[in-house]
């Protein structure tokens, strides 16, 4: 376990964020393997079924991940304050709430899955496979929730190494099970679904064994499960705020994709390639912001607001270093990067993909501030403003879908995200700067404060 309330801030943030970054890369490989195995063994219709199910799956799983991350912030505060009994109670309450909420989400998802697929204009020929795949995922969603909660709790205590190891184990299991269930046992897309669920169950079991053997601070007693109104309210407030933010992002992506689909096949292909490249570029931002949330939560619990302030600035500095590297890479070898991840050579596809990433990447300096500010505010217990900012992001994508894409074509799509980032950053930045707890005291201005 890592105490983020002591030591060199820059080293702590990098040490916390790097395993998260590697974990996110593993998660990307996890999805690539599923896609490759299903595409090569079962063909394009099965691959289309996985693709059509993807947005709904991502929205549901994203909400559950957000829930676990929100719970982790509350747990991190008690860990930072060295209130171990309260921390265990928070973990126990988080377990109870996670189970209850997952049961509700599972029931609602099973009822709504078919209408949602129809609403997204899923082709009739792949509908049975879509339903078969996503229903298995939904029925056994409890394993996804359980692993994400365990990983969030360990990260809240400053441990990002072991969740990474368990994710790597899950990825290896998923590869083997994909080949076995889809290729050898001919279980069609259902085999890919079972491979995912079994892999997540294995990673959950690994987490539990590790906690039992190595984490006595997390050994729960029956008395820890006593529900306390204030604690439950804090957990639900943080958890639902993070879950809704993840849902808003997923819904906004669906809306924006609908606008792009009206612009023709070449634009769709160009945007798909550019977004894949952007997702790779953005991984360090997401890991730094997650590190900031835990760092802020622990130091908030310890009452070290000066350290939180310095942590935020250190995280922003790291994000700017990465943004500068990305801009240099894009402006010196964008066509090569696009070919590298897609093999695309059609001029219209390559030119539009290059246009997208060259226009958007300089605004990564703004994006870094946005993501770090949003997560820092979550760590400080400020739940409403980040949620409003996510709502503004969703509204911005609606405006793009209804107005800009029709009037400005693909440039309207390209322009949308930088504008949304600037608006949301101004909102979050102004609120964060006005937080009296983070203002530099007079003694700090003279001495520079503690490290």
Image: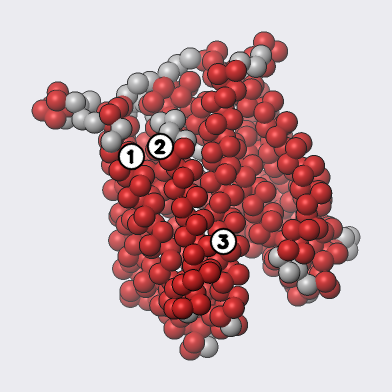
At 64% from the left and 63% from the top, the residue drawn is 32
Q: Look at the image and tell me in which quarter the C terminus lies.
A: top left
Report helix, strand or loop for mark 1.
helix
Mark 3 closeness class: few <14, some 14–19, many ≥20 residues within 10 Å: some
Residue 259 makes an appearance in the image: yes
Query: Marks 1 and 2, Cα distance to the nearest angstrom?
Result: 9 Å
Front: mark 3 or 1: 1
Mark 3 → mark 2, Cα distance in angstroms: 24 Å
Counting residues from the start of the chain, the first of labels 3 and 1 encountered is 3
Q: Residues within 10 Å of mark 1 (few under 14, many from 20)?
A: some
In the image, what residue occupies the spot 14% across and 30% down? 445
Residue 138 seen by the camera: no
Task: Name the quadrant containing residue 331.
Answer: bottom left
> Above or below — where is 88 with respect to 350?
above
Q: Which residue is mark 3?
A: 253
As drawn, 106 above or below 225: below
Q: Residues within 10 Å of mark 2 (few under 14, many from 20)?
A: many
**308 relative to 449 in the view: left or right:** right
- Decide which of 321, 165 is in the foreground and name it: 321
Q: Are marks 1 and 2 in contact (CB under 8 Å)?
A: yes
Query: Residue 382: which quarter of the image?
Result: top left
Query: Residue at label 1?
Result: 431
Q: Position of residue 59 (x, y in %)?
A: 64, 52
Structural distance between the alpha carbons of marks 3 and 1: 26 Å
């Amino acid at each position: 376990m890592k105490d983020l309330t002591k030591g060199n801030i820059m080293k702590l943030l990098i040490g916390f964020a790097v395993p998260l970054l590697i974990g996110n890369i593993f998660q990307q490989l996890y999805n690539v393997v599923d896609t490759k195995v299903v595409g090569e063994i079962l063909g394009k219709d099965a691959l289309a079924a996985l693709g059509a199910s993807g947005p709904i799956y991502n929205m549901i799983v994203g909400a559950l991940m957000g829930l676990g991350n929100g719970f982790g912030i509350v747990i991190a505060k008690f860990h930072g304050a060295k209130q171990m009994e309260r921390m265990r109670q928070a973990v126990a309450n988080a377990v109870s709430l996670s189970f209850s909420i997952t049961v509700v989400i599972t029931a609602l998802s099973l009822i709504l899955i078919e209408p949602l697929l129809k609403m997204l204009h899923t082709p009739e020929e792949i509908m049975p496979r879509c339903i078969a795949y996503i229903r298995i995922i939904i029925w056994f969603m409890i394993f996804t929730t359980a692993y994400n909660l365990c990983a969030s709790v360990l990260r809240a205590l400053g441990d990002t190494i072991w969740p990474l190891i368990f994710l790597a184990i899950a990825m290896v299991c998923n590869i083997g099970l994909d080949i076995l269930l889809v290729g050898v046992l001919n279980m069609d897309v259902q085999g890919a679904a079972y491979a995912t669920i079994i892999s997540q169950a294995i990673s959950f079991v690994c987490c539990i064994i590790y906690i039992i053997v190595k984490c006595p601070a997390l050994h729960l007693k029956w008395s820890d499960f006593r529900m306390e109104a204030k604690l439950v309210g804090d957990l639900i407030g943080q958890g639902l705020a993070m879950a809704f933010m993840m849902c808003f992002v997923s819904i906004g992506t669906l809306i924006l994709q609908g606008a792009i689909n009206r612009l023709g096949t070449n634009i769709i292909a160009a945007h798909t390639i550019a977004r894949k490249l952007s997702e790779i570029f953005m991984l360090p931002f997401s890991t730094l912001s997650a590190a900031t949330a835990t760092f802020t939560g622990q130091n908030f619990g310890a009452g070290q607001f000066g350290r939180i302030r310095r942590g935020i600035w250190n995280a922003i500095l790291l994000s700017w270093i990465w943004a500068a590297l990305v801009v240099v890479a894009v402006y010196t070898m964008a066509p090569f990067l696009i070919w590298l991840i897609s093999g695309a050579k059609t001029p219209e596809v390559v030119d539009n993909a290059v246009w997208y990433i060259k226009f958007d990447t300089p605004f990564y300096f703004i994006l870094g501030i946005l993501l770090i500010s949003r997560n820092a505010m979550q760590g400080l217990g400020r739940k409403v403003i980040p949620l409003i900012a996510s709502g503004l992001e969703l509204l911005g994508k609606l405006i793009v879908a209804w107005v800009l894409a029709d009037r400005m074509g693909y440039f309207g799509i390209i322009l949308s995200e930088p504008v949304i980032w600037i608006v949301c950053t101004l909102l979050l930045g102004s609120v964060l700067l006005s937080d009296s707890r983070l203002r530099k005291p007079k003694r700090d201005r003279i001495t520079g404060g503690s490290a």
